[in-house]
């Protein structure tokens, strides 16, 4: 089930939200689940890697990893507001030459992009209706590692996300959040040739790191 992702996420992730997230990142650094992902990726001890960050938002993952792990990154995002802030921050850090920014639904442009050592999706599968389509495109582009975060499959999030989607329906806003089945995502990635090497949990988010076998 493809979605008209750019249109939907452009209205869901506004310029004000993107600016607020960048301000918070500058003040406090990456969010907790992003820190777990960075820590897991760093544990692989890769150097001069290339990275594809899908739905990278304000770009925290490449801002951080370009310092030690990666020497180039591609940031594909369906939100133009987030991309604008990510670009500004990359320029401030002197990373403009190392990051390619693409405004698109990753599944639409994946076939035109080269593979990378690391592919990341931080809080992205939960914005996308068809996790198989998104994870397939992500897995096909990862030569070594794939890390992603997603909401945990627990009763309080089942209720929470149902409430959010209910209000989205009332507002006639087509953006929905999805609680995808973790066991099915794991089985899917295993069939794509990956093995899970790290799994960390917070109250809301779970972070999984996979390596290509
Ligand atoms: C909740 S935000 C997370 C941003 C960032 N990764 C973070 O954790 O702060 C979700 C992001 O994923 C993007 N997104 C969702 N589906 C996408 C897709 N199929 N292709 C590219 N970007 C996508 C949205 O535009 C948005 O920037």
Image: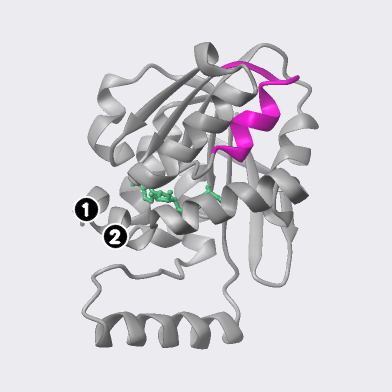
- Quarter holding the C terminus? top right
Is 129 located above or below residue 97 in the figure? below
Gap in Å between the C-alphas at discs 2 and 1?
7 Å
Q: Which x, y percent locates residue 182?
A: 53, 63
Which residue lies at the image location 72% right of the left edge and 39% below the top edge?
A: 38
Start and end of the magenta stretch? 59-72
- Quarter holding the N terminus? bottom left
Q: Secondary structure at mark 1?
A: helix
Q: Secondary structure at mark 2?
A: helix
The reply to whether the C-beta atoms of the residues labelled 2 and 1 are less than 8 Å apart is yes
Is 209 located above or below residue 160 in the figure? above
Between 89 and 111, the one lying in front of the other is 89
Q: Quick check: 91 left or right of 171?
A: right
Callout 2: CB less than 8 Å from ligand 1? no
Does residue 64 belong to the magenta stretch? yes
Q: Which x, y percent locates residue 32?
A: 73, 55
Q: Which x, y percent locates residue 24?
A: 67, 53
Which residue lies at the image location 41% right of the left edge and 53% below the top edge?
A: 15
Does residue 153 belong to the magenta stretch? no
Q: Quick check: 107 left or right of 188?
A: left
> Which of the labelled discs sits on residue 7, or is there none?
1
Residue 123 visible in the shown view:
yes
Which quadrant of the structure image shows residue 129?
A: bottom left
Q: Which x, y percent locates residue 167?
A: 35, 86
Q: Which residue is mark 2?
A: 11
Which quadrant of the structure image shows residue 9?
A: bottom left
Residue 144 visible in the shown view:
no
Q: Counting other residues with Cα less than 10 Å from the Cα at mark 2, is it few (<14), some (14-19), or many (20 or more)?
A: some
């Amino acid at each position: 089930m493809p979605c008209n992702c750019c249109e939907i996420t452009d209205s869901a992730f506004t310029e004000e939200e993107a600016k607020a997230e960048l301000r918070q990142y500058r003040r406090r650094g990456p969010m907790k689940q992003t820190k777990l992902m960075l820590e897991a990726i760093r544990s692989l001890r890769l150097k001069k890697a290339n990275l594809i960050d899908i739905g990278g938002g304000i770009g925290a993952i490449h801002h951080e990893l370009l310092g030690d792990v990666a020497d180039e990154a591609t940031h594909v995002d369906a939100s133009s507001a987030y991309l604008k802030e990510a670009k500004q921050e990359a320029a401030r850090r002197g990373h403009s030459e190392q990051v390619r920014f693409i405004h698109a639904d990753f599944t639409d442009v994946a076939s035109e992009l080269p593979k990378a050592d690391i592919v990341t999706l931080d809080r992205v599968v939960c914005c996308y209706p068809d996790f198989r389509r998104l994870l397939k495109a992500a897995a096909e582009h990862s030569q070594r590692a794939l890390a992603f975060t997603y909401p945990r499959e627990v009763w309080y999030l089942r209720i929470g996300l149902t409430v959010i989607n209910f209000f989205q329906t009332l507002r006639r806003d087509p953006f929905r959040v999805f609680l995808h089945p973790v066991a099915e995502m794991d089985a899917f990635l295993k069939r794509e040739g990956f093995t899970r090497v790290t799994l960390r949990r917070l109250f809301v988010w779970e972070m999984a790191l996979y390596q290509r076998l």
